[in-house]
Amino acid sequence: MQRINTNNVSEFILLGLIKDQNLQKICFGLFLAFYIVILLGNLLIIVTIQSSSRLNSPMYFFLTYLSFIDICYSSVTAPKLIADFLAEKKTITFVGCIAQHFGVHFFGCTEIFLLTVMAYDRYIAICKPLYYTTIMSKSVCTCMVVGSWLGGFLHSVLQTVLTTHLPFCGPNEIDHYFCDVQPLLQLACADTYIVGLIVITNSGLISLTCFLMLTASYIVILVTLRTHSSEGRLKALSTCASHITVVILFFGPCIFIYLRPSTTFSEDKNIAIFYTVITPMLNPLIYTLRNEEVKNAMKKLWIFWKIVMAE
């Protein structure tokens, strides 16, 4: 009730990514192309894995969900960003802002947990190959995916509850292209110090902890690979290199933005592009260009569709 009584803001104004009108038109076409690549690329990954009997290992099971999350994650922010490039006044309702804030943290945190699970999968596959099928059973993999979704949901609920109970009674301009917790804390007409500390704990420490776990697992993997054959070492390194690239692109910006006090910098919205647009767009390329099994499955799928279309 306190939030309703003191909240005089019914909508927010997003200042967007850039202010130059000519550049906005160029960015409209550029980011529209990016979003189409995100949708088609990740859908192709999902269809390829689901249609191939060879891609049935836990790694591809997790990759399917990663591609699905990337589609959902980018769809929370990209359509609004693209539309706002052509809009004179970039507004979003209070409810829409909170919904976008929930979606960003829900899918973003779920992806963090899923990337951590994928690193654990690689650790078991390389360091304990004899026990791999026993440890990474279908039921265990399913529980890991469900746990990732549940963890992302609980994280997002906490972030959203904290934000909605803040009073907004004055300025409503957000220097960003989507509604995130840090810019919203700056607009609240109340002391947000405690909320800021909770945000650091809830967002920043989750990102940092998972990143350290990922780093540790890959260090152990690299050490273990010294005892493998040259062929096995190259194959494992190729797979791990793909994962490490995604981890750096995704976790680096997240840690920079969320593992600090509730302050905002003008560079934040540019950095956020990496984990909301660039990483979801590059994931299909990263996982396919360095993976012969996926590339072969895609070739077979393409041949199949050519035959179907010819008939």
Image: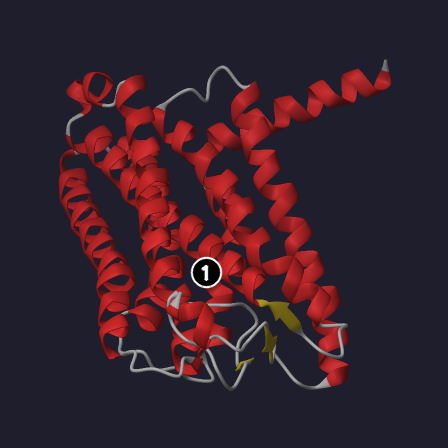
Residue 238 visible (yes or no): yes
Q: Is residue 79 above or below residue 188?
A: above
Q: Is residue 120 above or below residue 307?
A: below
Residue 27 placement, left or right of 98: right
Local SS, label 1: helix
Query: Could you say which is closer to the camera, residue 59 or residue 223?
Result: 59
Tell me if mark 1 has few (under 14), some (14-19) or many (20+) residues whose alpha carbon lies within 10 angstroms of its own: many
Residue 241 visible (yes or no): no
Query: Could you say which is closer to the camera, residue 88 or residue 207?
Result: 88
Instruction: Tell me where residue 273 appears, x and y as whole percent.
Output: 51, 67
Amino acid type of disc 1? Tyr
Q: Quadrant of residue 181?
A: bottom left
Instruction: Tell me where residue 267 appears, x and y as whole percent.
Output: 46, 81
Query: Could you say which is closer to the camera, residue 283 or residue 251?
Result: 251
Instruction: Tell me where residue 111 appears, x and y as whole percent.
Output: 39, 47
Instruction: Tell me where residue 29 appears, x and y as whole percent.
Output: 75, 65
Residue 183 placement, left or right of 29: left
Q: Quadrant of residue 43?
A: top right
Q: Quadrant of residue 33?
A: bottom right
Residue 79 placement, left or right of 182: right
Query: Could you say which is closer to the camera, residue 309 or residue 155?
Result: 155
Residue 307 placement, left or right of 297: right
Image quarter (top left, top right, bottom left or bottom right) of the N terminus: bottom left
Colour approach in the figure: secondary structure
Q: Residue placed at 68% from the left, 50% from the top? A: 36
Image quarter (top left, top right, bottom left or bottom right) of the C terminus: top right
Q: Residue placed at 30% from the left, 78% from the top? A: 192
- Tally of numbered discs: 1
Q: Residue placed at 28% from the left, 44% from the top? A: 116
Please identify the residue farthest to the right as the structure is shown. Answer: 311
The residue pinned by badge 1 equals 275
Q: Residue placed at 26% from the left, 33% from the top? A: 121
